[in-house]
Image: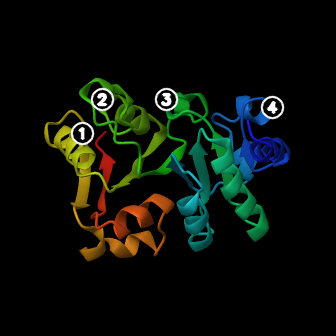
Amino acid sequence: MSRQKKRKFAENLERENVLQPGKPLFEEIRGNWHRLYFKNQQPITIELGCGRGEYTIGLSQEFTERNYVGIDLKGDRIWKGSGQALELGLKNVAFLRLQIQFLERHFAEDEVDEIWLTFPDPRPRDRDEKHRLSNAAFMEMYRRILTKDGWFRFKTDNTDLFDYTLDLIKSAQISVRDLSYTHDLYQSDMLAEHRGITTKYEKIFSEKGEKIKYMKFRFAC
């Protein structure tokens, strides 16, 4: 590990807005986000695979009446977003260092009001379907932690992954309501929902001419 990474990881250990293994709150937070961390009852939005936390930071500034949790396994990525949140004095932001498959260890049923899945690894090989973050098993997990009327929002440049997810919905493997989607977000009337926020990868893919796909829906009960 490089000296720079070691420094970032050491700083994450000291930051109150980073929850990760080894910190007491990491093990205690499930079902207790409002009481133990945010100390308010504002609705919670989580960003899966948040990277540097562009959406977590951007949305938390736009919607100060909501709480935001950016989730990623990479500590050096979380370091960037958590540092920015501290610099901006954002009290409605946390970062959770976690593999997505363990989400239910840290969020209870109906504890989350909104989920953003932004530019996940498409996992194109058939044998890797079980690792796709929009497969039926992951979606069922998201449904359990979301409130009844909570929104799920999915954004990607990858057409195959987007269509794969749509096919699951249309085949009723994932039961949803209020579905809206576009294969070209920048030419869609849904663009305003993104508040001008873009991720690092979104900028890269857009500059290469890739169209950005987006869908949102609520899970059917």
Question: Does the CB distance between marks 1 and 3 fall below 8 Å?
Answer: no
Q: Which residue bears the numbered disc 1?
A: 175
Separation of residues labelled 1 and 3 (CA atoms): 20 Å
Mark 2 Cα-neighbour bin, 10 Å: few <14, some 14–19, many ≥20 = some
- Image quadrant of residue 30? top right
Separation of residues labelled 2 and 4 (CA atoms): 34 Å
List the single residue furthest toward the left.
171
Mark number, residue 101 = 3
Helix, strand or loop at label 2? It is helix
Q: Which residue bears the numbered disc 4?
A: 24
Q: Which residue bears the numbered disc 2?
A: 129
The mark lying in front, picked from 1 and 4, is 4
Residue 12 pos. (x, y %):
78, 45
Looking at the rendered structure, the kind of residue marked 3 is Gln
Mark number, residue 76 = none
List the single residue furthest toward the front.
2
Separation of residues labelled 3 and 4 (CA atoms): 21 Å
Label 3 vs 2, first from the N-terminus: 3
Separation of residues labelled 3 and 2 (CA atoms): 14 Å
